[in-house]
């Protein structure tokens, strides 16, 4: 993948089917346990939506670009298993690919705003 200064963020919002949240969390946790060992993986945060109990957001940071992530990470075998099971657990998934530009209290971009 790319140098450490190039990062891509996946901002993923899930709308989980009623009664499927625990099963979703188990599937996601298994996927994350495999994913966290990838050399390009930086970090991830899963958050519950305070106002919508069946919605969660996953914020993943990877070394590289959107293109390198799609080419190198998406085809991994553990992701295929995850994707096959995910369709039975969610109503909707919205994915945005982001580039970090500024930060506070992190060292992702090495940019500081005073």
Image (cartoon, helix red, strand yellow):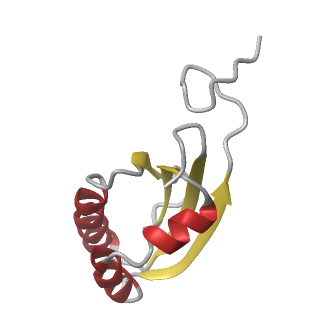
Say left or right for 80 vs 94: left
Q: Position of residue 88 (x, y in %)?
A: 37, 89
Q: Residue furthest right?
A: 114
Q: Quadrant of residue 89?
A: bottom left
**Residue at image point 58% right, 52% down:** 9
Number of numbered discs: 0
**Residue at image point 63% right, 31% down:** 109
Q: Quadrant of residue 78?
A: bottom left
**Front residue (pair 55, 1):** 1
* Placement of 66 over or under 111, stated as above or below: below
Say left or right for 72 vs 10: left
Q: Position of residue 58 (x, y in %)?
A: 48, 56
* Placement of 10 over or under 28, stated as above or below: above
Q: Quadrant of residue 31?
A: bottom left
Q: Position of residue 13 (x, y in %)?
A: 55, 64
**Front residue (pair 47, 6):** 6
**Residue at image point 32% right, 55% down:** 38
**Front residue (pair 25, 21):** 25
Q: Quadrant of the C terminus?
A: top right
**Residue at image point 60% right, 44% down:** 6
Q: Position of residue 62 (x, y in %)?
A: 49, 51
**Front residue (pair 46, 8):** 8
């Amino acid at each position: 993948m790319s140098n450490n200064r190039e990062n891509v963020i996946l901002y993923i919002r899930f709308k989980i089917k009623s009664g499927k949240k625990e099963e979703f969390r188990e599937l996601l946790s298994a996927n994350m346990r495999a994913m966290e060992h990838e050399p390009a993986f930086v970090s991830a945060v899963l958050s519950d939506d305070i106002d919508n109990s069946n919605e969660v957001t996953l914020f993943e940071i990877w070394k590289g670009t959107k293109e390198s992530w799609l080419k190198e990470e998406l085809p991994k075998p553990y992701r295929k298993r995850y994707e096959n099971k995910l369709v039975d657990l969610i109503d909707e998934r919205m994915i945005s690919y982001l580039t970090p530009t500024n930060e506070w209290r992190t060292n992702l971009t090495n940019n500081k705003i005073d």
